Image (spheres, grey):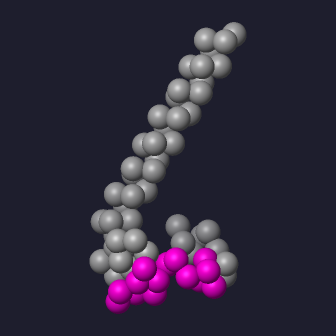
């Protein structure tokens, strides 16, 4: 039973790491030119503004 739990834990950790990398790659490829590499803004609105984050829906962001 312990081995099964450890295996599940490892699979979950590695899948989250891939998802983070994929998300970072997509952001750099599609968003960073306007919104900045850290989301601090540029030609586009800063994505790190609390007002923007609290009003934008997940559907709008993704």
**Residue 43 drawn in magenta:** yes
Q: Which residue is drawn at 49% across and 78% down?
A: 47
Q: Give the range drawn in magenta.
A: 40-53
30 on left or right of 4 = left
| Residue 40 position (above or below residue 38) | below
Q: Position of residue 31 (x, y in %)?
A: 37, 73
Q: Looking at the image, can residue 56 be seen?
A: no
Q: Which residue is drawn at 52% across and 28% down?
A: 11
20 on left or right of 32 = right
| Residue 3 position (above or below residue 42) | above
Instruction: Determine the residue located farthest toward the right in the rendered image.
Output: 1
| Residue 42 position (above or below residue 19) | below
The quadrant of the picture occupied by the N terminus is top right
* Residue 38: quadrant of the picture: bottom left
23 on left or right of 10 = left
Q: Which residue is drawn at 38% across and 65% down?
A: 27
Say which of 53 and 61 sits in front.
Answer: 53
The kind of secondary structure the magenta stretch mainly shows is: loop
51 on left or right of 26 = right
Q: Position of residue 43 (x, y in %)?
A: 35, 89
Q: Position of residue 25 (x, y in %)?
A: 34, 57
Q: Residue at x 41, y 83 (%)?
A: 41
Q: Looking at the image, can residue 4 be seen?
A: yes
* Residue 36: quadrant of the picture: bottom left
**Residue 14 drawn in magenta:** no
Q: Total number of numbered labels? A: 0
């Amino acid at each position: 039973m312990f081995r099964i739990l450890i295996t599940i834990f490892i699979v979950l950790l590695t899948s989250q790491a891939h998802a983070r990398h994929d998300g970072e790659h997509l952001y750099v490829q599609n968003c960073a030119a306007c919104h900045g590499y850290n989301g601090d803004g540029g030609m586009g609105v800063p994505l790190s503004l609390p007002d923007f984050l609290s009003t934008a829906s997940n559907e709008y962001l993704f």
